[in-house]
Amino acid sequence: MKFQDKLTKVLQKHSYVLNNLERKGLIKESVHNKEALISKNGALVTWTPIESTGRSPKDTVIVKRQESEANIDWDSPNNIPITQDTFDMISEDALAILSKKEKLYVTDRVLGADSSYALPVRTVTDNALSALFTDNMFRQVPDDIGKSVFANRGFTLIALPYEKLESKKYTGRLRMLPNGKTSDMVVAMDFDRSIGIVYGSAYGGSVKKLMFTVMNYILPAEGILPLHCSANEGPDGNTALLLGLSGTGKTTLSADPRRALLGDDEHGWSNNGIANFENGCYAKLIHLKPEKEPEIYNAITHYADYLEHGAIVENTMMYPTGEFDFDDERLTPNSRGSYPLTFLTNIKKSSTAGHPNTILFLTADANGVLPPVAKLSSSQAMLWFLMGYTSKLAGTETGIVEPVSTFSRFFGEPFMPRNPDVYAKMLGQKMEQHGTQVYLINTGWSGGPYGVSKRIDIDITRAIVNASLTGQLKDVEYEEDRIFHIFIPKYCPDVPTEILYPKNTWSDKNAYEQRARKLAQEFNAHFEKAYGNKNISKSIANQCPGK
């Protein structure tokens, strides 16, 4: 018997199933069940076990089946296989747990603002707050869902956030912990049978990212490119995508008062244009300041009756007065807030737009050797898309912090399970088809590395972004950088010409050359390690810095 049929029987036999409660009902249940407290401003607040304050990548697994195994990059450390038998054991245990629960909550939603590929998702959980999370993050089922390519093959998600697997039963099947015991947590995906199970993780991101990974797997087969990006639209209808890892400024730069936001994290690019997957935002809250992130701050802290609020605040310090301290990271620096897009002021309600005129790849280069802006050809764009480069900072010595190069393919590697050439080729094809301009924007350092120089002024970066999005960089004269094979503009409105060429900003030109070549070598080493045995075209490989 199919898993979905077994689940239907469990729901039919259960004495207390709450199907598609309205939002107020889910909020009431979350408070009544003591799954959350009410803050002073009305938002719901919850604290998860320490092992559930973030994703658990080593417990996130994919069922390896003959039908799909050739589509998945099993060489990636993020794609951890489990057997069909192990997944069947997990699913049977989940059904047994559900059948014994006092209450069950069911929500029927979709992922995807474009009805032509909206994915129906049925979530079944014993936790009202998890159900409310899906109400915040997933979209209402549209009236025309019947036209979706996935109308007859929806996805089933089981969320048991506070249950634990019987670890002894899974010895040799799931991850072994350093103490010699088997993990009692799993986030498992079966792409072929359209089932996901979150077992033992109370972190809301486990639900969100599981479904994002599912979309990233199923969409390319339908000719749709999934992207880990924010998207906005200008008053003239031109659409922009911003891709970047944490710390590159993606959220800040996409929140432009002159442009309507489609979404801040997950989108699809189909023949119809761009569409947000989600209904809401799941924002980091640590060190949240109203002057820096006013939209996020107001979405979380606006005052409303708790039944009218429904934002979920995870793992943030709240005082007995019900007030937040967003700077307290004693539990975790990964505190989060979940809320609907409608809590923001400048959004496009449909969350859809035309084909992107412009794509921005954001990087915070702490080496200080990349230009503040560069234009990328389609081959160069595919290369930088594959690499997903930025810098992280580590280790202080006599006041100098040495940057560490970080690469995350497609700016979201853990959630992109298919073979990498699939996503890269699709980007290049869509760029060529729609005449999309791609720019690399360095939001990091200029004039030297971190610890020696300063970060590029945010006003300069905003001027560059504005020039990129308004077409002012489309026809200016460019010069190719001989190390990084990217095209640097000789002029950018409202930006001092001398800083466009990073070497000019270094007092020691030899030090610049050495630092630039060192970063190029790191690019080459990572490319060979990650893609040396992959089906990556020579035209892309030849764009690798240093070649």
Image: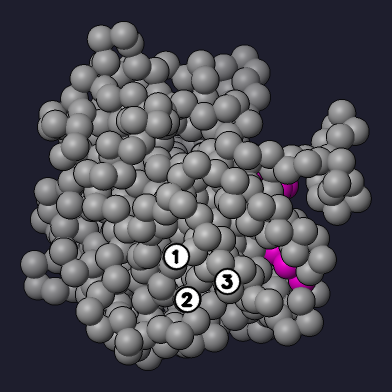
Which of 182 and 420 lies nearest the eye of the viewer? 182
Q: Which mark is residue 154?
A: 2
- Foreground: disc 3 or disc 2: 3
Q: Quadrant of residue 510?
A: top right
Start and end of the magenta stretch?
A: 55-64
According to the image, label 3 marks what residue? Answer: 4
Mark 1, Cα crowd under 10 Å, few <14 / some 14-19 / many 20+, is some
Task: Look at the image and say whether residue 352 sits in the magenta stretch.
Answer: no
Q: Which residue is mark 1?
A: 122
The answer to which of 128 and 301 lies nearer the viewer is 128
User: Residue placed at 26% from the left, 44% from the top?
Assistant: 25
Residue depth check, mark 1 versus mark 3: number of the one nearer the observer: 3
Looking at the image, is mark 1 or mark 3 earlier in the sequence?
3
- The three-letter amino acid code for the residue at tag 3 is Gln
Residue 388 visible: no
- Give amino acid for label 1: Arg
Disc 3 element: helix
Residue under the image location 35 percent in, 65 percent down = 109
What x and y, as percent, mark residue 529? 78, 62
